[in-house]
Amino acid sequence: MSWDYINEKKFKALIKQISGTITEKDGELVPYHAIKGKGIIWCYQPTTKTMVRIPRNSKIYVLDMGEESDPDCLAFSSDGIVFVIDKDEIEEIGFN
């Protein structure tokens, strides 16, 4: 899947959720996900077209799960990094 376009409305709502200023009209909350395992994982960052190190077991937000057949999804780390990660590497942990 091409990651050239990010849903701007969903991204802004996610930023509001993280900062604690989200309102009911912004839409549903995005649940936390965690990267499985320990150590680090290298993920593709589409904005810089480079690989980035992401710590495993860290909380992330999924921006776009893509199609059912897509193996990867677009995620946002608590450090502010947008990256692509394999769906099998993450698990939903809900709301904290």
Image (cartoon, rainbow, N blue to C red):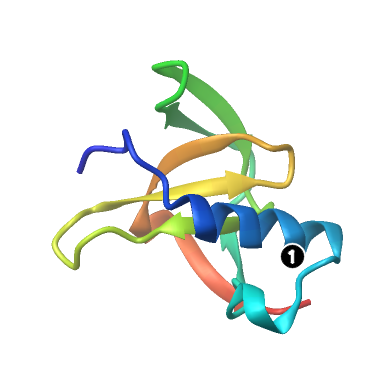
Residue 9, position as x, y percentages in the image: 52, 58
The front one of 50 and 3 is 3
Q: Quadrant of residue 23?
A: bottom right
Residue identified by numbered label 1? 17
- Indicate whether 79 appears above or below 25: above
One can see residue 36 in this view: no
Instruction: Identify which residue is drawn at 35% across, 61% down.
Output: 65
Residue 49, position as x, y percentages in the image: 39, 17
- Indicate whether 15 appears above or below 55: below
- Indicate whether 40 appears above or below 19: above
Q: Element under label 1?
A: helix
Going by the numbered disc 1, the residue's amino acid type is Gln
Q: Quadrant of residue 95?
A: bottom right
The front one of 85 and 26 is 26
One can see residue 30 in this view: yes
Instruction: Identify which residue is drawn at 69% across, 37% down.
Output: 80
